[in-house]
Amino acid sequence: MIVRVPEGEVRPLRIAIPKGALYADSVRALGLAGVDVSGLADPGRQLIVRTPGYEFIIAKPTDVPIYVAYGGVDVAIAGKDVLVEAELDVVEMVDLLFGGCRFVVAEREDAARSIEELYHHLGVIRVATKYPRIAEAHFAARGIQIEIVKLHGNIELAPLIGLADRIVDITATGRTLAENNLRIVEDVLASTARFVANPVSIKTESVRVRELTDRLAAVVPLP
């Protein structure tokens, strides 16, 4: 995508920031790195916020890798979880070390059989998740065939109502799982926030992208 600006004028660097859990620390990290983040403290319903030299796109977390890969933005902050699940062509520049969480396999606390026993008996395991690529890759590496039940809401419900044998979900503390009588049986993947760039922007906006990368790298972990 080509953004045209008047001759002699430098276009703003376009940055996607995820809504939700990573938003506050993303804004904080950019501010510590010397980016003008005025207007981001309380953007209201604005989806695009402009400051001198920058244009911020406030996006749904799962959309961020798409914006980066297809050139809608130059750079972005995104969780490793959504990057792995999206499997798109973006370049990871810096591990920002905040937003730490992990993917886990969980089951009912009263589950009578292990995954191996259940698989031997049934020949397939039914797994509920919001992250089918991550779940499939994890079980494929173990040589276990699974049937994916893709959900968009509370994954914890699936084993409780008999919809799935196991779940693959993301957790920070495991508290929600425990409160719903589920136990963690495997770790799948650790996730933190990453600063990522569009491959073309790394070339066309090399100086600005790499300068911002270096400034962000200098402020992590966040004080």
Image (cartoon, grey):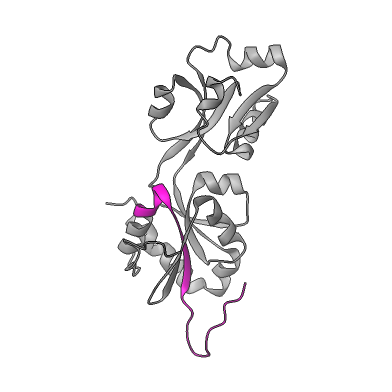
Measured as percent of width and height from the top left, residue 11 is found at 49, 79
What span is colored magenta in the figure?
1-25
Asked whether 178 or 118 is in front, the reply is: 178
Q: Residue at x 70, y 25 (%)?
A: 145
Image side of residue 47 versus residue 149, left or right: left
From the top left corner, tell me how far across and down residue 36 is, in percent.
Answer: 34, 70
In the displayed orientation, state which residue is furthest to the bottom. Answer: 7
Horizontally, residue 116 falls left or right of residue 64, namely: right
The image quadrant of residue 26 is bottom left
Q: Quadrant of the N terminus?
A: bottom right
Residue under the image location 66 percent in, 31 percent down:
148
Residue 3 is one of the magenta-drawn residues:
yes
Q: Position of residue 19 (x, y in %)?
A: 43, 53
Q: Is residue 152 left or right of residue 41?
A: right
- Is 135 within the magenta? no
> Which residue sits furthest left?
223
